[in-house]
């Protein structure tokens, strides 16, 4: 009898500890009570509740099931169990429980509400809508139902209706957790950045120390084209959490976009220090290599960009950066291979054609170099640099008529483009040198025959 009395006391103590949110201590007490009398359904249910608060979902489900084995048909325990099963993504099991709740308690609106979520997760949106309208007949003002059906609508791309439902949630329960974030994401998906930022700011105001929310807001600000404002927000996150290397990386990409590669490299170096040499961030090596390339640190840039091409071999932009690096290092043969790789991925890349032409010129191959420059101009008719190099190649190949035609075309497009105007002024020199070489060659040939 003494053991039973002590078990009752420990169960009561567990209840008081729950009221103080001392979950671990409460679990110790309720476990001690159940060790004496495991057939107390309310104690098993209480144990499930405590385990939920501790984030131990699988054990919580087991405790709720144990409670129902002792006393089946307890509506609140059944709903608690189905809720945990939803968290565990065991949607079919949850639906089985919820169907039983509705059979026993036809007017239980939360059972319909939870089934909206379950059917949404299973992709059965028609059933989700059916559950929503059944729930509305019982309680037309349930914020949970509006939230859940909004998720279903958004999953089907019906974002305007989803936003309407989520705004209805805010009317019913202004502090409903996560709904402002949902609305922001929906507006972001349709590129209404101002509305997206407004609702995301509301979510941040409710949880100002949440760095992930702040990070989302900073990314959204960057996406809306406000790079300097985004940089300030990433810097704010770093102040709150200096070890948040994702923000250091994002700040580095902003510096790079703003044409400040030195600051970008500094941010990327911090990422390496915080998250090891390979932080696993998408396109990290590409951006790091791009910043190093802009600073003329070709060897380090090449090493990073080679890593980037290994990680994303099908990205022509990465291959282009590595090719640019090799060209800057005066390695035209190797650079040519990479520009060809770019063209294998993107045959109509005018810049790659032009730069491959430059590589050919550096190797003394004017004919193939000219062909690539002409292709670049064909793809991009106002590509002045390619036109300039095409004119120079035509002059080297003594194609005077073609060079003059290209010169006239270039001047018509942009008469202020200095390199083209300069080559136009020097055109007669190319021709004079060409004839001088021919005459020298003829004289040399006659001298050799005479000898």
Image (cartoon, helix red, strand yellow):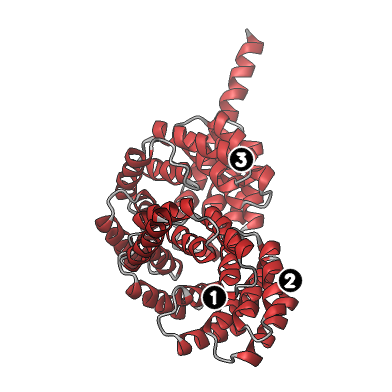
Q: Report the residue at 44% width, 79% height from top.
A: 176
Q: Which mark sits nearer the N-terminus, 3 or 1?
A: 1
Q: Nearer the viewer, residue 264 or 154?
A: 154
View extreme (top): residue: 451
Q: Secondary structure at mark 1?
A: helix
Asked if residue 226 is positioned above or below residue 443 in the image, the reply reads: below
Location of mark 2 (residue): 124
Q: Which mark sits nearer the N-terminus, 3 or 2?
A: 2
Query: What label sits on residue 313 in the rendered view?
Result: 3
Give the quadrant of residue 410: bottom right
Viewer-side label of 3, 2 = 2
Asked if residue 310 is positioned above or below residue 185 in the image, the reply reads: above
Give the quadrant of residue 77: bottom right
Q: Secondary structure at mark 2?
A: loop
Q: Secondary structure at mark 3?
A: loop
View extreme (left): residue: 239
| One can see residue 206 in this view | yes
């Amino acid at each position: 009898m003494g053991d039973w009395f002590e078990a009752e006391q420990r169960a009561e103590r567990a209840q008081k500890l729950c009221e103080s949110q001392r979950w671990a201590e409460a679990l110790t007490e309720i476990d001690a009570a159940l060790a004496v009398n495991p057939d107390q359904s309310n104690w098993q249910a209480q144990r499930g509740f405590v385990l939920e608060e501790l984030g131990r979902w699988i054990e919580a489900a087991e405790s709720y099931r144990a409670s129902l084995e002792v006393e089946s048909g307890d509506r609140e325990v059944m709903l608690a169990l189905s809720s945990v099963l939803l968290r565990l993504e065991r949607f079919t099991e949850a639906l089985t429980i919820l169907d039983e709740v509705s059979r026993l308690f036809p007017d239980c609106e939360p059972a319909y509400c939870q089934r909206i979520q379950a059917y949404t997760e299973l992709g059965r949106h028609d059933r989700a809508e059916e559950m929503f309208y059944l729930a509305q007949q019982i309680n037309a003002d349930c914020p949970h139902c509006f939230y859940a059906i909004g998720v279903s609508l958004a999953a089907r791309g019906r974002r305007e209706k989803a936003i309407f439902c989520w705004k209805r949630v805010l009317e019913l329960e202004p502090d409903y957790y996560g709904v402002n974030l949902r609305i922001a994401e929906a507006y972001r998906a349709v590129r209404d950045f101002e509305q997206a930022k407004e609702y995301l700011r509301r979510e941040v105001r409710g949880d100002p120390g949440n760095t992930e929310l702040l990070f989302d807001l900073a990314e959204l600000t960057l996406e809306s084209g406000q790079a300097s404002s985004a940089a300030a927000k990433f810097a704010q996150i770093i102040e709150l959490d200096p070890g948040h290397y994702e923000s250091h990386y994002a700040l580095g990409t902003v510096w790079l976009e703003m044409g400040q590669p030195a600051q970008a490299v500094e941010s990327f170096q911090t990422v390496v220090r915080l998250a090891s040499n390979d932080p696993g961030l998408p396109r990290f090596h590409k951006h790091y290599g791009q910043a190093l390339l802009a600073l003329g640190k070709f060897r380090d840039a090449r090493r990073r960009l080679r890593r980037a091409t290994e990680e994303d071999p099908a990205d022509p932009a990465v291959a282009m950066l590595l090719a640019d690096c090799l060209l800057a290092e005066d390695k035209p043969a190797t650079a040519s291979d990479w520009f060809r790789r770019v063209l294998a991925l993107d045959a109509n890349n005018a810049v790659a054609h032009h730069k491959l032409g430059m590589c050919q010129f550096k190797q003394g191959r004017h004919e193939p170099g000219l062909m690539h420059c002409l292709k670049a101009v064909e793809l991009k008719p106002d590509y002045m640099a390619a036109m300039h190099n095409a004119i120079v190649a035509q002059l080297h190949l003594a194609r005077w008529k073609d060079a003059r035609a290209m010169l006239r075309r270039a001047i018509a497009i942009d008469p202020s483009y200095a390199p083209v105007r300069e080559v136009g002024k020097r055109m007669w020199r190319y021709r004079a040198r060409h004839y001088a070489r021919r005459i020298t060659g003829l004289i040399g040939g006659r001298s050799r025959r005479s000898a």
